[in-house]
Image: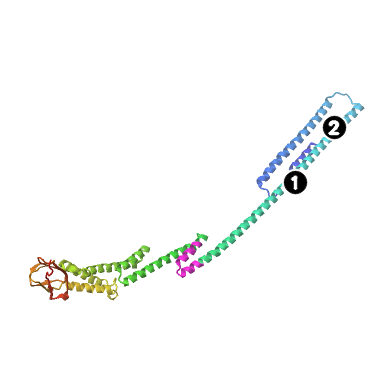
């Protein structure tokens, strides 16, 4: 009977445990451990009961063996037979109890397994529903994002198209404003970066062209200082334009020549001084030589009529300043005559003088009369001019 019990127990223990197919390996190992522990406890209880029954039987058998008797009587035989039947009956009952206990344990295990399976199925259903919901939510998000990106793309393309149109029409401010909107939609898009550089380049080019036109116009009008200021502004915008350096050099040359000519023309009376006259001659020679040697840099002489006129005027002033003018000073022989920068002439009736063109201050004085004072400009046209100096107004 003992082997049968062990076989049944081993069959019970060796029965495979149903598991949810979708469980992880770690959860399955954990459940298997729990199941093994409960099974071991139940098996231990059955073994203890069985051992107790076996010990009782062994004790009964030992007692019967040790009890002295000669030859059993019929009554004793019956008693022994009865006891034997009782023992057998007890063993059968014990076996039945054990079998029932095993069946009960098996049914409990089956119920537990079924319950676990149902719980796992519920968990799987809930998990599957959550996964479906998450997938659905993720899909909706992706769709919304896709629609948003498509809308942004369409708006971006339209703004870029408007920007290019504004660029073609040279509407740089409008193009820049459109591009700023495009940059807000797509900050890192290479198209916006390229367009930004293009707009800046076009704006820069336009500014330079406008300043260049103004500078050329000023040069045409021979306003060299104004032209230079425009070229310097262009140089600030872009210092790598070689032609600007050449233009600056040309305008500076004209500015210098114009300054030298103005010193001769605007203060011709200074040429009465021989040193000033000599300096003016050298200045004029420098201008004429510079024009001759720098034809590659300067404009043709026909394109600078104001400069040409100034050169001719300076030439005439220098020429006139070198001429000796013969004049005659007449008085009443009572008036003291003097000429600044010439000297005291005293009382005279007539005196001839050799003067250079210029402005002279003549003063006549006589006791009891108001002084005679007059600034006289002597030019080449005043050759043989007669000047009267007499004090007539009494005090």
Residue 248: in magenta span:
no
Viewer-proximal residue among 122 and 271: 271
Report crowding for label 1: few under 14, some 14 to 19, many 20 or more residues within 10 A (C-alpha).
some
Q: Is residue 44 above or below residue 263?
A: above
Identify residue for label 2: 87
Is residue 320 placed above or below 179 in the rendered structure?
below
At 66% from the left edge and 47% from the top edge, which residue is drawn?
Answer: 25
Picture layout, residue 369 above or below residue 1: below
Seen at 73% across and 37% down, the residue is: 41
Q: Main secondary structure of the magenta part?
A: helix
Q: Visible in this render: residue 186? A: no
> Residue 135, position in %: x, y?
64, 55
The location of residue 338, given as percent across then percent down, is 11, 67
- Check disc 1 and report the residue beneath it: 114
Q: Position of residue 224 (x, y in %)?
A: 30, 68
Magenta span: 161-181
């Amino acid at each position: 009977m003992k082997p049968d019990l062990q076989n049944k127990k081993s069959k019970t223990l060796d029965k495979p445990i149903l598991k949810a197919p979708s469980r992880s390996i770690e959860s399955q190992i954990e459940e298997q451990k729990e199941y093994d522990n409960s099974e071991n406890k139940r098996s231990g209880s059955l073994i203890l009961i069985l051992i107790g029954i076996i010990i009782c039987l062994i004790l009964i058998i030992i007692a019967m063996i040790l009890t002295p008797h000669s030859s059993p009587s019929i009554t004793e035989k019956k008693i022994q037979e009865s006891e034997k039947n009782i023992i057998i009956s007890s063993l059968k009952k014990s076996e039945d109890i054990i079998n029932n206990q095993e069946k009960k344990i098996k049914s409990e295990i089956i119920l537990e397994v079924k319950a676990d399976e149902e719980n796992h199925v519920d968990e799987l259903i809930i998990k599957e529903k959550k996964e479906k919901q998450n997938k659905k939510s993720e899909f909706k998000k992706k769709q919304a994002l896709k629609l948003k990106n498509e809308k942004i793309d369409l708006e971006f393309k339209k703004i870029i198209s408007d920007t290019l149109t504004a660029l073609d029409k040279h509407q740089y401010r409008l193009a820049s404003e459109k591009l700023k909107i495009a940059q807000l939609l797509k900050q890192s898009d290479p198209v916006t970066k390229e367009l930004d550089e293009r707009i800046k380049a076009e704006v820069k080019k336009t500014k330079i062209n406008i300043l260049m036109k103004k500078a050329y116009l000023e040069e045409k009008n021979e306003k060299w200082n104004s032209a230079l200021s425009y070229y310097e502004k262009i140089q600030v915008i872009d210092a790598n334009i070689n032609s600007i350096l050449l233009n600056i050099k040309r305008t500076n040359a004209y500015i210098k020549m114009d300054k030298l000519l103005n010193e001769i023309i605007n203060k011709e009376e200074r040429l009465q001084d021989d040193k000033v006259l000599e300096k003016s001659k050298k200045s004029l020679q420098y201008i004429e030589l510079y024009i001759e040697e720098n034809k590659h840099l300067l404009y043709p002489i026909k394109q600078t009529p104001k400069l040409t006129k100034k050169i001719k005027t300076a030439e005439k002033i220098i020429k006139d300043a070198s001429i000796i003018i013969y004049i005659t000073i007449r008085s009443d022989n009572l008036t003291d005559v003097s000429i600044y920068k010439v000297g005291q002439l005293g009382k005279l009736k007539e005196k001839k003088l050799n003067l250079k063109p210029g402005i002279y201050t003549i003063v006549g004085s006589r006791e009891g009369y108001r002084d005679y004072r007059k600034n006289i400009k002597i030019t080449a046209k005043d050759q043989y001019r007669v000047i009267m100096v007499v004090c007539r107004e009494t005090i």
